[in-house]
Amino acid sequence: MGVLDSFKYKDVVKLLEYWDCYYLRPGAKGSHEVWFNPNENLEITVVNHWAKECRRGTLIASMHTWGITKEMIEEFHRNKWKKRI
């Protein structure tokens, strides 16, 4: 089982917050949100499906466009309950 298996919206939010991203506003569609990644100076769109697990392929593609690498995800997974300084 990989690091990205069984990621839900709340896990995506924790990952984004771990990497200093923050919520900006609701997106154009009802289930979307716009977040900001200050490390990449980039607005990112996140699909908000509270109860559903994110599809692995969609998650990988999204994180790639968000500027979040596999190594960053693995670090988050190892330190999930610790606050990054």
Image (tube, grey):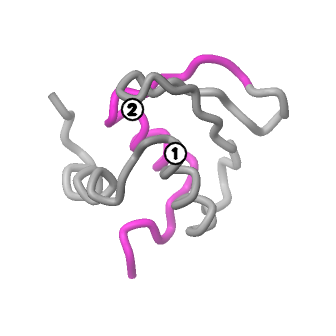
**Residue 83 position within the rendered picture, expressed as x and y whole percent measured from the top left:** 21, 34
Against 75, residue 81 (above or below) is above
Mark count: 2
- 33 sits to left or right of 59: right
The residue identified by callout 1 is 10
16 shown above or below 69: above
Question: What percent of the width, then of the height, locates residue 20?
Answer: 35, 27
Specify the farthest residue to the bottom.
1
- Residue 44, given in percent of the width and then of the height, sits at 59, 33
Asked if the magenta segment contains residue 19, the reply would be yes
Q: Amino acid at mark 1?
A: Lys
* Residue at left offset 64%, top offset 27%: 34
Residue at (49%, 52%) from the top-left corner? 64
Which sits earlier in the primary sequence, circle 2 or circle 1?
A: 1
Give the quarter of the image for residue 47.
top right
Which residue in the rendered view is the most extreme toward the right?
Answer: 29
Tell me: residue 55, above or below residue 11. below
Q: Which mark is residue 59?
A: none
Q: Quadrant of the N terminus?
A: bottom left
Residue at the image position 54 percent from the left and 46 percent from the top: 65
Mark 1, secondary structure of its residue? helix
Q: Which residue is disc 2 drawn over?
A: 17
- Name the spot of residue 7 as percent of width and height, x first: 50, 60
**Regarding mark 2 in the picture, which secondary structure is present there?**
helix
Which label sits in the foreground, 2 or 1?
2
Q: Pointer 1: residues within 10 angstroms few (<14), some, or many (20+)?
A: some
